[in-house]
Amino acid sequence: MTGNQSTQEVTRNVRERMYKLPTAHTQGQNQVLEYKVGLDSARRVTRGLFKETHERNIQGYITLPSQNCTEHIFYMLDAPDFLNPVEILVEFETLNPEEGPVLDVDLPKSKKALVPFTKDCGEDGECISDLKLRAQADIKGDRMHPYIVQINQKKFNLVIKLINQKENAYNSRIAVIFSKNIYFAGVEQNDDCTPLGPNNVTCKVGYPFITPDSEISFKMKFEFNATHLLSDVYIHLEATSDSSELNETMSDNEVTISIPILYQAGLHFSSNLKDYRFKIATNDTIPDVIKSIEEIGDAVDITYMIENDRDFPISNLTMNIAFPFLSPANNTLLYLTGMTFSSNNVGGCNDSHFVDPLKIDPENPQKPVPAEEHFKNTIGICENNAGCVSISCTIYPSSFVQFNMSLRIWKPSFIKAVFKPIGLIVTATLTIEDSPLVVLNKAMERSAVRTVTLTVSKDATHGAVPIWVIVLSILAGLLLLALVILALWKAGFFRRPLKEKM
């Protein structure tokens, strides 16, 4: 192909034009010559095939002397390289050299020819391109506010734009290298992206070349890899071509993206109760002895459930349960009667001396003698309160764990005490251990808290007269006095002379 052809003609000739291969002809005694023709013989993969065989090699025979030419037609494949010429190698030998004339040993037995492609690169024939690469992910994050990878949003896109600001860029391509915590999930608007490894993809762009002032955009899709947890998403892109480019314009040929991330654990932590209400009646009395757990007071059964969909690997969990046990006057408030678990994935709890600590039964009755005190509302909050019980349990990764916790309101303490309605707060905290990259919610917290409030109220103190009774009694007395005075006045008692009255 000649250098005068247009860019469109180059592309058409590369893909469609049939090339004619002439063979030399000689004069003299008739002799059969065997020849072989190969395309791109120096390359491992050929860019062209012969139309007759659809292979890169072909062979034939010619009888010498001959005045005719033998033609073999080949066509070009959709190859990545249209910058370097196609090499054609012809090798020949007489068919039966032992029965007749032989070829001159001083002359070559092969002939090589190069068929160049047309280049639209100006008068000097050298293409000097200027590639400009841009890339942006649709997720954002920094060290102060990392991106949270949620269990239902594990995909993201990378928008890539390649611009050529000078002469044709032949065989343009973008190499993409990325971290192990993501994997390549596909591409849009570009059908020629090839994974070269688990973390390496190469995309051909603008095949076979990008013309001056052209812009090409496409989108790569990635998905987070749950088997590798890393603190950053890392993507490095580099644009190259077979054309030349000056060193001073290559600084914008690369883009590096690094996004700090955290992973949201697929944990669901819930309880069956949010609040509970109890009332101490005015006629409730303190029993002389307590012989069974049922005699302590009202029962509270709390169930905690932990569900794990295992999207992102986590290490052990710790569950801490705290509740108010003693008042400032050492009166018992809540009495733990039992804890059970539905799974063998609980490593253990430090609850042995907190469950039924008095070991109440008919053979070991307890005589409640609570001290009289005034309860404040803050008595039921376990914050810097020495009277609180704290139980810690280790949980191994599992799909489902259920905690059942049984408590009793220690009624004698509330019968003896003076108080307005108070709330006894039971707090359960679930914490991820040794997993700095995994959080439990969008707030980037590594723990989740569930609270249950047990509200205890008391009827008016026995023997006290309500204010409204006193007010009504005064009003009734005044009304009665007024009626008496009115009756006496009508009877003329106040109009008689003093002596008469005497």
Image (cartoon, rainbow, N blue to C red):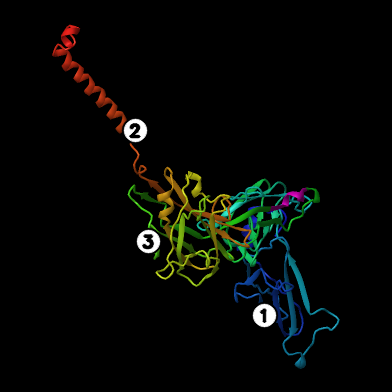
Task: Describe the element under mark 3 as helix, strand or loop.
Answer: helix
User: Does 57 sit left or right of 365 as displayed?
Assistant: right
Q: Are marks 2 and 1 in contact (CB under 8 Å)?
A: no
Region in magenta: 249-256
Neighbor class of circle 1 (other Cα within 10 Å; few <14, some 14-19, many 20+) is few
Q: Earlier in the sequence, mark 1 or mark 3?
A: 1
For badge 3, the amino acid type reads Glu
* Residue 490 percent coordinates (x, y): 14, 13
Q: Quadrant of the N terminus?
A: bottom right
Task: Describe the element under mark 1 as helix, strand or loop.
Answer: strand
- The residue singled out by tag 1 in the image is 59
**Is 342 contained in the magenta span?**
no
**Labelled disc at residue 295:** 3
Q: Nearer the viewer, residue 78 or 321?
A: 321
**Is 255 contained in the magenta span?**
yes
Q: Are marks 2 and 3 in contact (CB under 8 Å)?
A: no
* Residue 159 percent coordinates (x, y): 60, 51
* Residue 183 percent coordinates (x, y): 60, 63
Establish if 156 lies above or below 51: above
- The residue singled out by tag 2 in the image is 467
Q: Quadrant of the C terminus?
A: top left
Q: Nearer the viewer, residue 134 or 232?
A: 232
